[in-house]
Image (cartoon, rainbow, N blue to C red):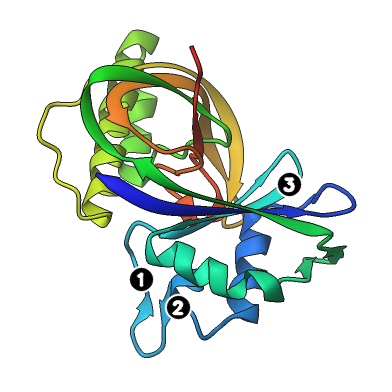
Amino acid sequence: MILKTLILILKTPEPAKEDASKLRGYIGNEFKGYPILHHHIEDAGYVYTYPKVQYKIIGGTPIILGIEEGGEVLKKISDDITELRLGNSRYKIESIQMNQMNAEFGDCRENYQYRFLTPWLALNPDNYQKFGEIGDWKDKKIFLNSILVGNILSMCKGLDFIVDRQLYVHSYLDETTATYKGIPHLGFMGEFRVNFKIPTFFGIGKGVSQGFGTVTVKES
């Protein structure tokens, strides 16, 4: 499957100190007429599906990913993004780098290696308790790998893609702490490989629209 993607890299005079939730909040508020930017629809509430606009702040650089129609909306608004007001900070936009591409997405025979650029929030309240009850790290790793497969399948469902083959994940992960919706969460950083093509900057797991679980292809 080929997905049209668009990445906006926003150049600011100094690195952004805030997290991507502030970036999402600012852009969504500035361009309220585009529900795809903030995932809220009047009278319907929050839209729970794989977000086609995802916000990241990586190494202090604000980045916005648009997938399919999300990319079209980003293209429309890009000229109107002249500053960012994130919390108590204001950043002038010096320039915007726009990268458009047709990205391959889907299951395949060969394995691809990926690295998390931001913490992967794998656990919900139910499986957090199960994870804590597992004593052996090897068994924890098997448990996390199954969640990773589930996250990829959920992403596929949100993008109307049907997986034709079984997915096999191998991971090398370390625990970390991440703040999501103002609450500390257990997250994971590291690498994994899977027989599936995931475009760079796509997110998996919880909090994808706010930049969590962002992956990049690790070049061999």
Q: Residue at x 34, y 26 (%)?
A: 144
Q: Nearer the viewer, mark 1 or mark 3?
A: 3
Q: SS for tag 2?
A: helix
Q: SS for tag 3?
A: strand
Residue ID for mark 2: 35
Q: Residue at x 27, y 54 (%)?
A: 159
Question: What is the C-alpha distance between the residues marked 2 and 1?
Answer: 9 Å
Residue ID for mark 1: 47
Q: Residue at x 36, y 90 (%)?
A: 43
In the image, residue 141 above or below residue 89: above
Amino acid type assigned to the residue bearing label 1 in the image: Val
Whether the residues at callouts 1 and 3 have beta carbons within 8 Å, the answer is no
114 relative position to 89: left or right: left
Question: Does the rendering let one see residue 51?
Answer: yes
| Residue that sits furthest to the right in the current view | 13
In the image, residue 111 above or below residue 197: above
Q: Residue at x 35, y 56 (%)?
A: 50
173 relative position to 21: left or right: left
Q: Position of residue 164 (x, y in %)?
A: 10, 35
- Closest to the observer, 188 or 101: 101
* Residue 82, label in figure: none
Q: SS for tag 1?
A: loop
Badge 3 local density, few (<14 within 10 Å), some, or many (20+)?
some
Q: Position of residue 95 (x, y in %)?
A: 78, 58
* Residue 61, label in figure: 3
Question: Does the rendering let one see residue 134?
Answer: no
Along the polypeptide, which appears first: circle 2 or circle 1? 2
- Closest to the observer, 184 or 166: 166
Along the polypeptide, which appears first: circle 3 or circle 2? 2
